[in-house]
Image: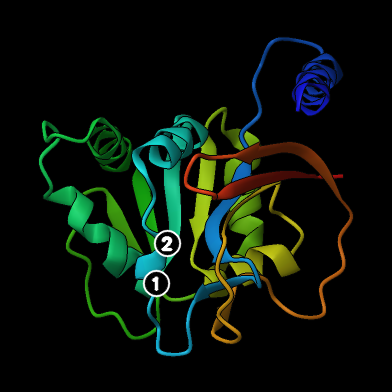
Amino acid sequence: MPYLYEHTLVHELQTLLALGDNTRMGKLLYSVTTSLDGYVADKDGNFEWTSPSEEVLAFINDILRNVRTFLLGRSMYETLAVWDTLPTDGPSAGMNDFAQIWRAAQKRVYSTSLSHVTTAHTTLERAFHSETIQKLVTESDNDLSIGGPHVAAEAIQAGIVDEYHQFIVPLLLGSGNYWLPKDVKSQLELVDVRKFANGLVHLQYHKI
């Protein structure tokens, strides 16, 4: 939708003008793939249906291009840790690209039960402190990405998530692990809608 794309450019320009120079402020991003009814996994914890096509993965990589820190819950970390060992010269350009983005970034893992981490550039945290993350975002010209609905819920409740990227799979699950916390009110602005060849739809929202 051209008008949404143009509106996004206007929004970014207004942000730069408000800063008074060309300094780019970091943002906290929440990017997640959900079913049509908003679940990231079914009641049994299965999320195999979230696997992206090459087209979708290339789009996700562009969103994460400026991310230098991943904030992850235990389950999301254990899912993504394999990217530390996957080859970066495989047959999938999207997978190679994501592996490079992942390896170049710092990771903070939030867990009270995980005993140690196995990936490079990774620290283990026992509690999520929204004030610390907000300070990191404010002082950085790179983005941070938060992953996993439980740790993301803490950031959403604290009001520090700047962008929401929801990738909606045309599938109804009926129950499972929901992508947003309950009892949180926040006004958002829709800035991008995109449909992919496999039927998946991307919605991007900015915090107002």
**In which quadrant will I find the N terminus?**
top right
- Left or right of 52? Residue 6 is right
Secondary element under disc 2, as helix, strand or loop, is helix
Q: CA distance from mark 2 to mark 1?
A: 6 Å
Q: Can you say whether 72 is above or below 180 in the image? A: above
**How are the colours assigned in the image?**
rainbow
x%, y% of residue 60? 46, 40
Secondary element under disc 1, as helix, strand or loop, is loop
Report the residue at 29% width, 59% height from top. Answer: 80
| Quarter location, residue 74 | bottom left
In the image, 73 versus 123, the foreground residue is 73
Q: Can you say whether 121 is above or below 113 in the image? A: above
Report the residue at 79% width, 16% height from top. Answer: 13
Q: Judge whether residue 73 can be spotted in this image.
A: yes
Report the residue at 87% width, 68% height from top. Answer: 185
x%, y% of residue 148? 49, 67
In the image, 29 versus 200, the foreground residue is 200
In the picture of the structure, the residue carrying the numbered disc 1 is: 47
How packed is label 1: few (under 14 Cα within 10 Å), some, or many (20 or more)? some
| Quarter location, residue 39 | bottom right
**In which quadrant will I find the C terminus?**
top right
Tag on residue 144?
A: none
- Left or right of 96? Residue 184 is right
- Left or right of 10? Residue 55 is left
Q: Amino acid at mark 1?
A: Phe
In the picture of the structure, the residue carrying the numbered disc 2 is: 50
x%, y% of residue 51? 36, 57
Q: Amino acid at mark 2?
A: Thr
